[in-house]
Amino acid sequence: MTQEISYVVGDASAPQGEGLKIIAHVCNDAGGWGKGFVLPLARRWPQTRTAYKTWYRDRDHVGRKLGLAVARGVRPRGSLRL
């Protein structure tokens, strides 16, 4: 099976097409919020900032490990599902 990457130009915070979508965002553990891709995410889902800041504040409970993944869900109409 051949798999290809398709590049689409547009707003990554508003993915196109049917079905569930995953918006992957890779970040450091510096605790900052206010530049780059988080800005359109926060405009669409303001609760994402609170969720990240809470994770950052409590991160020592999960440790600082390379490769750590934290998943947060949002509903299509904009409400955050944790």
Image (spheres, helix red, strand yellow):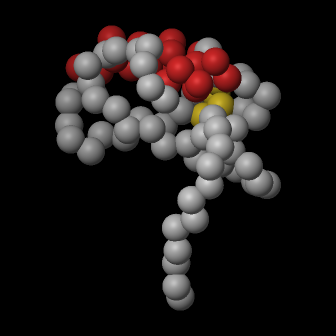
19 relative to 11 in the view: left or right: right
50 relative to 47 in the view: left or right: left
Residue drawn at x 31%, y 16% as measured from the top left: 31
Residue 30: percent from left, percent from top: 26, 19
**Image position of 45 with respect to 5: above or below:** above
Q: Give the camera-side residue of 19 and 59.
A: 19
**Residue lying farthest front?**
9
Residue drawn at x 56%, y 59% as measured from the top left: 7
Tell me if I can see residue 14 in this picture.
Answer: yes
Residue 42: percent from left, percent from top: 58, 19
Tell me if I can see residue 58 in this picture.
Answer: no
**Residue lying farthest bottom?**
1
Residue drawn at x 52%, y 67% as measured from the top left: 5
Residue 59: percent from left, percent from top: 29, 21
**Image position of 5 with respect to 29: above or below:** below
Residue drawn at x 62%, y 49% as measured from the top left: 9
**Image position of 72 with respect to 7: above or below:** above
55 relative to 43 in the view: left or right: left
- Image quadrant of residue 15? top right
- Image quadrant of residue 36? top left
Numbered marks: total: 0
